[in-house]
Image (cartoon, rainbow, N blue to C red):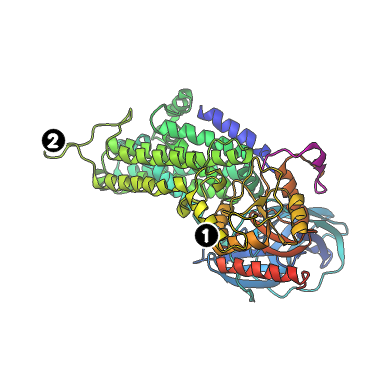
Amino acid sequence: MIRILSFVLFALLPFLSFSQKPNDIVKWKFEAKKINDYTYDIIGTATITQADFHIWTFNPGGKDGEIPISLIPTTIKVARGNDYKLIGKVKPQGKQKEKKDEMMGTIRYYEGSARYTQRIEANKNTTVKGVATFQTCNESGCLPPTDVDFEVKLTDVVPRQDTTSADSVKTDTDTTLSALPADSTGADTTLTASDTTGSNVIAGSTSAQDQGASDDEDGLDKKSSWELFLMGLFWGFVAFIMPCIYAMLPVTVSFFTKRSKDKATGIRNAITYALSIIIIFVAIGALISLLFTQKTMYEISSSIWFNLFVFVVFVVFGISLLGAFEITLPSSLSNAMDKRANTNNIGGIFFMALVLVIVSFSCTSAFISNLIVYIFTSGNSFGGVIGFLGFGLAIALPFALGALFPGIINKMAKSGGWLNAVKVTMGFIELAMALKFLSNVDLAYHWGLLDVEVFLSIWIVLFALLGIYLLGKLKLSHDEELPKNAFGQPYVGVTRLFFAIASLSFAVYMVPGLWGAPLEAISGFMPESKTHDFNLKKQLTEIQINSGSSHSSSGSPGNEVRPEKYTDKLKSELPGITAFFDYDEALAAGKKTGKPVLLDFTGHSCINCRKMEKAVLNNPDILRDLKDNFIVASLYVDDSSPLPAGERYNSKLDGKLMKTLGDKNLDLELMRFNSVMQPLYVFVDGDGNVIENAGGYVNDIPRFIRILQSVKAKHAAGHQQ
């Protein structure tokens, strides 16, 4: 069964993507500058066309020396070729900025433009190809990483007399930075390329300072991938304590030590076995990294179909972990590998490791799927290799340590009922996490399956049952009897008791959410508040803002013009605020009332949108100001509501027919504001003229209040800056 699921996943992934692309923010020009008869500089110049955007340096920095996973460094890779060789490393040149960010530490980037130079020596006329990977950001968010392919033709090469077929040299990066020179001349060929795509919101804003810094390419991937490695390590250790692997440890170590001619040989064989496990899992990760780029991973993780598929996979694995059935690979495969396994040579030991990986798939498959989902949402091109390196290391390390220090085996907890308890616990958690992915699809298509009450009720029941299970009051098919104390009474250990307390406490914490309590700890996972049938917090907030509003709760609403379009499916996420869901209708309301219009580009599955709404926009002072002085338009970019036939049109970006409300709103965001970030807050007047672009997610109430005051002042003054 798992083989079929894996095949379907990898068959569908390349097709699950968005086709829309933003306007050109970064324009690339690639050219060849001739140095002498056979030496050329391949120069790539990135020109940033919007003043508030930037691109990252080769090493964008980060907090405590670790590059945040959301910052994708710029890379320039020149393809290998038989007609030329690379001289040295790619040299970046530009006016580097550096700033301190509360969340991400010290970060470094280029504004305006940057230039990258790779020197080559050619032995004949040829074409040099390569790819530039970059991420475009401003203070409120980032576009996803983008690849731009380039090629430059060399047409007047005079070979050096002693030149032979040039050996390819792997492209690397340099750490030298200098002031941006004037545009080069004498280029034989010029290619202009530009491309941008989807969004990935991050937070952070402080003033930047001009400062040069050294970029260390050698440590780049390691630093930027620590989070992926640790996540792989975590899921690997969880998989290790599953019954089908943990119980194999003493048997396997004993097998190597007793069947070997001496202790040293036994240790060597056990370590070879552990290394083979790591190699197998790294090979799986390498396949993922080879098949999917950063851009592809982002597009896949944003797909509705991917969310639905992950929901199904998580449910299947969750039920399996609870003991309903086992997910295994075909027995013929494990039998074939087992025949090749022996301790007489390295190949035989490798096949023994392969047998373990195959046989234990019933335990590890759920956690491998968790790691794959995390890899796809990380946007890291090498995430597969790094994540599965951690996963394989976590499983292999105990086998190596057991061979080196046999005494550890005797001190380890014996196999027993606690192993199945861990397995069942992870089953409950898998089922809970599956609901988040179903909720994303449910909100986009307005199925109405998971409103807030239903979502929370299921979570409360799941974690309450988990707590009861850990206390030994609920038994499943594979559970053993609890141990008995000196008085013959069954008991639970202290560790298990504390996990039960944590699970039951979490269930109790969620109960007030049924009546509208914010539940900020899990607000990003919950469905939108508009699906809440009885929201006491929302009602109290409405009373509070109406008491100080220029419009009483019984009088005419703050938005004198009422919305008509899409109100049967969409509701405002802001208490007391009448929201519009159609751009043109909102502009008409702004024009009629003389109020500025807040365009809130949002999404049903946008976690930062929910955080912004609950942490900032739900502030009574902000709500009161929005109610009295603004028209609010919530423009969902992922909504599936069909557009009326007369409103459908072909996008000027790619010619695609805009058929849904989400298509229209995303196209509007791309065309008007060169962005696909959610949330994005833009203030316009009734004619659509921009008053102020407030950017994306920033958890800062005073700042947003100042923005509202600034917009009102500019609007009153005719938008004069």
- Looking at the image, is mark 1 or mark 2 earlier in the sequence? 2
The image quadrant of residue 649 is: top right
Residue at screen point 57% across, 48% down:
377
Q: How far across and down, in percent of the image, does residue 174 sit?
A: 65, 66
User: In the displayed structure, would residue 617 be above or below residue 245?
Assistant: below
Check disc 1 and report the residue beneath it: 544
Left or right: 149 as drawn, with respect to 334: right
Q: Residues within 10 Å of mark 2 (few under 14, many from 20)?
A: few
Secondary structure mostly seen in magenta is: loop
Q: Is residue 269 magenta?
A: no
The image quadrant of residue 641 is: top right
Which range of residues does the magenta coloring cover? 639-654
Q: How far across and down, in percent of the image, does residue 540 sit?
A: 50, 55
Q: Residue furthest top?
A: 332
For the residue labelled by badge 2, is the local secondary structure a helix, a strand or a loop? loop
Q: Is residue 455 visible?
A: yes
For the residue labelled by badge 1, is the local secondary structure a helix, a strand or a loop? helix
The image quadrant of residue 48 is: bottom right
Q: Residue furthest left?
A: 487
Q: Nearer the viewer, residue 263 or 683?
A: 683
Q: How far across and down, in percent of the image, does residue 577 sit?
A: 61, 54
Quarter of the image for the C terminus: give it. Answer: bottom right
Q: How far across and down, in percent of the image, does residue 712 sit?
A: 69, 68
Query: What amino acid is at disc 2?
Result: Gly
Check disc 2 and report the residue beneath it: 488
Query: What amino acid is at disc 1?
Result: Gln
Q: Is residue 165 visible?
A: no
Residue at screen point 45% across, 47% down:
515
Which numbered marker is on residue 233? none
User: In the displayed structure, would residue 271 be above or below residue 555?
Assistant: above
Q: Nearer the viewer, residue 316 or 689?
A: 689
